[in-house]
Amino acid sequence: MPPYGAGSYVHPSLAVAHAAASPYPPEDSSPTIQDLEEFLNDPNLWTPPTAAQYNSTYRSMAPAAPTSGPPTPPEKICWHCRTRTTPLWRRDTRIPGLLCNACGLYLSQRGKLRPRELIDADDDSDVVREANYSGPECTHCHTRTTSVWRRNKVGAQVCNACGVYERLKGKERPLSLRRDKIRPRNTGND
């Protein structure tokens, strides 16, 4: 029997000292698969580590988990118009990447990609439009985009949202409710 107990682990650098007690050939000859199988199956020479031994040894060697939270998925970009925001991402077998809702619908309905003029019309660069704009402006919230222009009780021109709010509630619409884009009506048919 070897001088070390059953289940003991002997580091390879210490194995030379125990070579005389080992039933295996010296270290200078490479072990065969049969040698390894005999070693692993002989309970006098090796036993698997306990759960506590495994956890203390191998968990400490594992790479540290990221502390910033779950990994972020890659950002989605429309293959055609390069937009990063859309209510729905679409796929088409003819296109190698994702399509935004507008490009995907146009392609499925017309069989061709959406023209550059329509893509440019969707651009959110309101800064240029605001500087050159000379149309009506709401006297209350100062918006320039609305589905319909109205007049309030004193006759001032107001946007649809401010006009409807004042008519229904009897007071001016709070400026905190102002939106830069017109929201479609929620019909509940979704």
Image: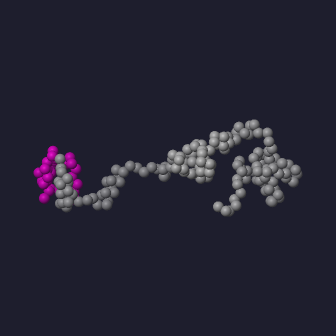
From the viewer's side, name the closer residue of 44 and 85: 85
Quarter of the picture holding the C terminus = bottom right
Q: Residue 138 location, x and y as percent? A: 80, 47
Instruction: Say if the magenta span includes residue 10.
Output: yes
| Identity of the residue drawn at 15% across and 51% down | 18
Q: Give coordinates of residue 154: x percent, y percent.
A: 88, 51
Q: Nearer the viewer, residue 133 or 46?
A: 133
Is 59 magenta? The answer is no
Query: Which residue sits at x=15%, y=45%?
Result: 28
Q: Which color scheme did the rendering employ for the protein?
A: one colour
Look at 31% across and 54% down and name the residue there.
57
Q: Position of residue 69 (x, y in %)?
A: 49, 52
In depth, the one of 33 and 97 nearer the eye is 97
Q: Which quadrant, please, contains the N terminus? A: bottom left
Identity of the residue furthest to the front in this view = 111
**As drawn, which residue projects farthest toward the left?**
20
Principal secondary structure, stretch drawn in magenta: loop
Magenta residues span: 1-29
Asked if residue 182 lies left or right of residue 115, the reply is right
| Residue 100 visible from this viewpoint | no
Residue drawn at (18%, 57%), measured in percent from left and top?
38
| 108 horizontally vs 127: left or right | left
